[in-house]
Every structure is written in C-alpha cells, then in structure tokens.
Image: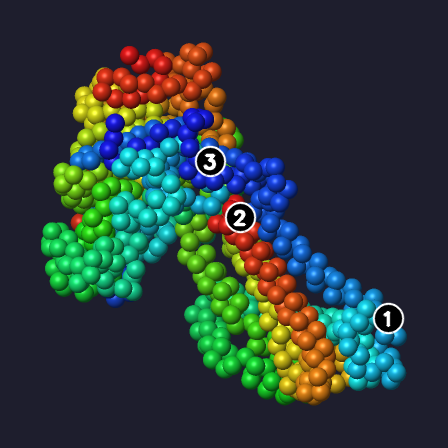
Amino acid sequence: MSLEARAVGFRYGSGPWVFRKFDITVGAGEMVGLLGPSGCGKTTLARLLAGHEDPREGRVLFDGAALPRAGYCPVQLVSQHPEHAVNPRWRMRDIMCEGWSMAEDTMEMLSIQPEWLDRYPSELSGGEIQRFCVARTLSPSTRILIADEMTTMLDAITQAQLWRAVRETVDQRGLGVLVVSHERALIDALCDRTVALEAADAPEP
Amino acid sequence: MSDLLEIVDVSVSFTRYEAGLRRQKLEVLSGLSVDVRRGEVLAVIGSSGSGKSLLAHTVLGILPGNADVSGLMLFGGEELTPDRQRQARGREIALVPQAVTFLDPLMRVGPQVRWGAPDNGNGSRTQAQRHVFARYGLTSEVERSFPSQLSGGMLRRVLLSTAVVSGASLIIADEPTPGLHPEAVAETMRHLRELADEGRGVMLITHDIETAIGIADRIAVLYSGTAVEVCPARDFVSDGEALRHPYSHALWRALPGNGFTPMTGAQPSYGDLPNGCLFYPRCDRATRECAEERPALRDVRDGTVRCIHVT
Amino acid sequence: MNGAAPQTHPSAGRVSCSRLALSGRQRTLLTAALAALALGVIVAAGVLLPDTRLATDLGARNQAPSLANPFGTDWLGRDMLTRTARGLTTSLALGMAAASVSALLALALGMAAATLGKAADAAVSWLIDLFLSVPHIVLLILISFAFGGGARGVIIGIVLTHWPALARIIRAEILALRGSEFVRVSRRLGRSNLHIATRHMFPHVFPQFLVGLILLFPHAILHEAAVTFLGFGLPPHEPAVGIILAEAMMHLSTGRWWLALFPGLALLAMVRAFDILGDNTRALLDPRTAHE
C-alpha cells in the first residue's frame, strides 16, 4: 500500500509551471519529509497528492489506482490554516464527527477538552481547532496523511503534542505520512527520509 | 522602570452572548504586566490563544466594541487613554502587520507609504518615504508599482517602511513572518533589530521561539492571557535551567531540537479560568496554594515571574 | 486585579443602575420588534377600521385633521386614516407577495449560476447585467403595462425587476463556498453533494437570503406605489397609497395638505420600518456583529 506521484506537474491556466516531472512515494508506516522554500509549490503539490486538485500532467496513484472521486479518500490533507478547514457555523462536535465517530483515546491523545465540543470555531484558538482537524483525519480509513505545514502556525508544545499523536498512529497501524515543511529541524526530528522540491522554472523573484 | 511602554496589571474581558440574551464575560487578558524599553526588542511568545495579538490590539486601542479594559498602561510616562491611543496610533506607535493583504491592491505603494509620514509641509512626506525606501533598497520604480507587481520580499520591506516612515518610537510587529523561509525571516528580523538599535522600542509578537531568541533582548512568555515570565533572551539556552516558570521550561523542551517532548493538556478556556495560578492544572510542581490564589508578580534573577515556587 | 488602577475604558457592561442601559443585542432585538410592531399596527388598522368610515359623506368633505378624523377627510368625506391604512395594507400584501417571489427567483437563479456549470453561469450573469443596466422603474412600467396593468401587472413587474441584486449575492456566496477549504475537506471525507448542499451551503446562504428578502419588501412597496402613482399600476378603484397620492396631487394647490402629507409619511414610515428590521436582522445573524 502506497501513495505514488509519477512525473506530476502543475500550472495555473497557461502560466509558468509551478513544478514538473516530480516523483514521490509514501509507503505505509513511514514518515517522509518534503522540504523546500516557500513559494516553490509545496502546498500545490500537497493538494494534488490529496486529490483536492488534479495535476496538469503525470498521475497520482494510490495502490496503483487513481484516487477515488467520491467516497472517503484514503489520502487526507491537513493544512496550515485550520480556521479555513472548518465550517464556521458548525459546532466542533459536528466538525469532528464529519470524518468518523472518534474513539476517545484519539481525543485524549490530542488533548481535546470535552468542553470544546460544544463551541464554535470562532471561540477556539488556531491550535485548538487544528487538534480537531488532525483528529478528524486520523480515522482508520485514512492510509496516508499529507501534513502541509500542519504546525507552522502553532506554538512548540501544541506542535509536539500533534506530532506525537500522528507518530503513535504511524507506529500502531502503519499510517503513512508526508511531512511538508520549510523547517529542517522539524523534519529531522520526525522523518525517516527527506525529498526536496525545487521550483520548475525560475525561482520566485 | 520603563521609559517607553509600561503595562501594569492589564485585564481585558469580552462580553459574549450565549443562548438568547444571556451574557457571559470572558477574561482574555488577566493581570498582564510587561514593559518595552527604548532600544530593545521585546519578544512576546506563547501559544495561539494566549493573548499575544490581543496585547497588541489593547496597546493600539483597536479592540472590538464588546471589550472591557482595566489596569494601567503608560506610554512615555503618560497614561495611555483611548484618546491618547487614537492620537499615537500610526504616529508614535506603529504596527507592522502580519500579511501583505494589509496593503491596498489598487494604490501604488509610494503614496500608500507616504500617508503614514508626519506632514510638515513642503513635500516632507515624499521625502520621508524616499528616505525610508532608499534605506531598504527599494528603488523609485518600486515606488510607482502596485502591490501585485512586487515580490514577497519587497512587499515585506514596503510593510516595514509604512511603520518606519511614521517615525514611531514604539513598533509592534504582530507575527511578521508567518511560515516564511529562513532567509526571509532573518531579513525581517535584522530590520527590526536595526530599528531597536536606533533607539526605538520593538515589540515582536511571535509563536516561534527560535526566531525570537535570535534578536530579542528580553522575552515575555504568555500563557492564558498573562505574562508568566519576562526574562532576558539569553536564558533560553542549553537545557533551559536558567528559565524560571515551569511553562517556559515546557515550551523550551517541546522544540524539535530540544527533545520534542510535549506536555499534556491544554490551556484553560477563557470562560472557565482556574481560581489560582492559571497554569496549575498542567503544572507538575503545583501545590495546594497554587490552586487557591493567583501568584503575585515576583522579581527573580533579572526577570519577573508569576509562580510561587521559583527561586 | 488592581482595584486602584484607573479605568482606561468606560465600562458599559458594569452599569446596571440605569434601567436604560440595554445591552447591544437587547437594543437590536427591541428595535427589530418595534419595527415589526409598527407593521403589525398598519395591517391591523387596515383590517379593523370599519367600512362605514369609507362611505361617502358629503356633509363632512375636505375636513382638516381632527380627533374624529386624525388624517382629515377627502373631497368625498371619506376618512383619510382608513383609506391610508387600507392602502398600505394593499401595498404591503402586493409588495410582500412580489418580493417573496422575486427572492425565490433570485435564489433559484443564483444557485443555478453557481452550480450548473459555465454556460448556466454565463447566461444568468448576462441576465443580471441586462436587468441592472436598465433603470428599474422604466422596466417595471414597461413590464406591468405589457401584462395589462392592475395587480397582476405590478406583481409580475416587481418580480421580474427585483431579483438581480440578490441573485448576484447568492451566486457569489455559493461560488465562494464551493471553493472553500471546508467544503473540499468534506468531499474528501466522503460526504455526498446532498450533505454538502444541505449541511454546509444552506446554513450560509439562508441568512443572506432572509435579510435580502426583508430588504426587498420596502423596495417592492415603494415601486408599487410609484408605478401606481404614475398610473401604470393598480386601477383607481383599488385602495392603494399610490392612488391616494396621485389624487392628492390635484388638491395640493387648494391648500388641502393633509391629503398627501399623512399617507406619504405613513408610506415612508412603513418602508423605513422594513429597512430597520432588515438591518437589525443582519446584525444579529452576522457573527462579526452578533456579540457587540
């Protein structure tokens, strides 16, 4: 079981290529780092890998087949800005349950406080919401997690808490993780191997 | 004490509506004390929701209408009343905003920056703006450009120019480098350091400890709306034994390079703060006294701390 | 907290001695309730005032306002208060019917533009621009004239001319929602289109729709009155404010000021009441202002 990108490339309209001919594989139970400066297309790549966007060339394959269009996607994405990833008019309980009916130990692992469940996102901090976003994707049906600068906006303690929860899931049931970050220290602390992404054409001016 | 900005026991609460007309008061800053001196960079660090940005908004006087402020703020030895804040905002106290979205996309950047300059007649604004642009290596071509025509790095220098051109003596930078690559962060930090070295005071708000220690003279650690510790930046070294507050220790040890050890639990919710020390529910040194009373501010080894156990 | 520290903000929340110190939300609700009450009174007056007050009474012609006839009487001795109340009730009924249909049309077209693909979007956007480029009142007159005037003509005219602004808002809102991250996440979490439409989109669009609907009423009422006033709307035997005002114009030069003044003011008051109701509803529904 693995996620594979083969010679993927992306550009907006007929603009310059953000990147081209990029290959990456993330297997079960491994944590792979994706390192690169800001503006080189890491976020775009992360979105392609999770099926939020289609590549303009090349293919993204899970277990040798294209990602499913409907139904639960085995590849899930957690992005940098948790506030955008939750419906502001929903209570946290509903947001959390949109993914799966969560086991209590997941909540505990992420230090999600029971009283947060009845709040709205505007009443919680970014770090608190991000715990829900991670919890939502840690369902057993998720085989690969794409973490796009998942803890960049968070303080060190919350960052360590979230990564410990992800790490435990990797060890317990072989979740595969792609850690997208510009921080080498973080990737060094987490990952078994690292891939670098470089901009296709001229780097950002 | 401080000749620039002094914040003494400032509390801020928001009134929120629950179901229907029932109102609840949420204390979001509780008894926060910190000061910024001329010529220094004070870094304010803490998790999201610890009140970092609120502190900036409180100093600038741009809190929403349902906020209620108490405590004492002094700016240049003078009380910072709402009227004084209106007067000082953008002139004596300037904000370096987080994102380039704070620039008007429909206006050339030269005039935008000029607006922030004090008007002494005779084109002094244009002069001031050109002077600052020259300082940051921004050409006259940049002056005539629209924000969308500039690169991220140039835009950050333009943003900085808007604060510098005002001639403000206090600069508040609210997360000026969110998720930027290391070189860009270093450049912004170098500029902020220069401003402090010229005699201004800089309050740098960030969640990134490593960036903060790189340039700050002193660091204020915020937790749940109060400054649990204010100390020299040099105390954040090796295994952190020079730090005072247990939360500062935990923050330091959680860095990927320092063990990556998370502490469990979460910050208390604002509607539901503990009666005693705000940190005691998560603290491994907590005793019964901690649960009963908010610890007073104490001076310990060149810094201040809100914890009764620190020596 | 330091009790001796000076307050840097006057604390509105702590003043509880004054009975007038209403909280923001109480004030908003009270204003909205008063506006709704005013509208209720108009309807009640239109229904409850007896027909006998409308009977021709040539002995009481052209009387200035008095206790018996607060709005005065007209040249046939009919009570102007009763006529105005009836007229406003008619306007209200017509306006609400027309505005509701128009708002539903806006909802349907806005949703179609946002969800049925590029061709549908282009067609609806073109229609919106087309209708917005011609002055409302001209189009309204043409349409109601084409449909033979009368209540039917006015309603169809208002329905067809008032939908574009709201449709544009709804279209933009849905487009933004479709591109929003939480909707994309929901889809990747295996949720169906139906789930996304009912659970994610509807709660966002509904408040917009509701406020848009309330703010359409005064427009529709004013335009109904205007078209009727100009003679392209309701026939003279219907009790309508537009008719009353048109007739009153003929008597203004003779010094019977009350014939135009009170019905005009009443119409303005009703329109304003709807505006206030709409604005306050928006303030309550918008999370950015709901707590202030």
Q: Which mark is residue B13?
A: 3
Does dot 3 land on a helix, a strand or a loop? strand
Is mark 2 in CB contact (under 8 Å) with mark 1? no
Mark 2 on the same chain as mark 1: yes
Task: Give the residue at mark 1.
Answer: C50
Q: Mark 3: which amino acid?
A: Ser
Q: Mark 1: which amino acid?
A: Pro
Distance from label 2 to label 3 (Cα)?
Answer: 16 Å
Is residue B297 left or right of C44 when viewed as pictured? left
Q: Is residue C145 above or below residue A133?
A: below
Q: Mark 1 belongs to which subunit?
A: C
Mark 2 on the same chain as mark 3: no
Rendered residue at 60%/49% (across/down): C27
Is residue C120 left or right of A10 when viewed as pictured? right
Tell me where residue C257 appears, x and y as whole percent. 70, 80
Does dot 1 land on a helix, a strand or a loop? loop
Q: Residues within 10 Å of mark 2 (few under 14, many from 20)?
A: some
Tell me where residue B136 appears, x and y as whole percent. 13, 51
Nearer the observer, C178 or C256 = C256
Rendered residue at 83%/83% (across/down): C61
Q: Residues within 10 Å of mark 3 (few under 14, many from 20)?
A: some
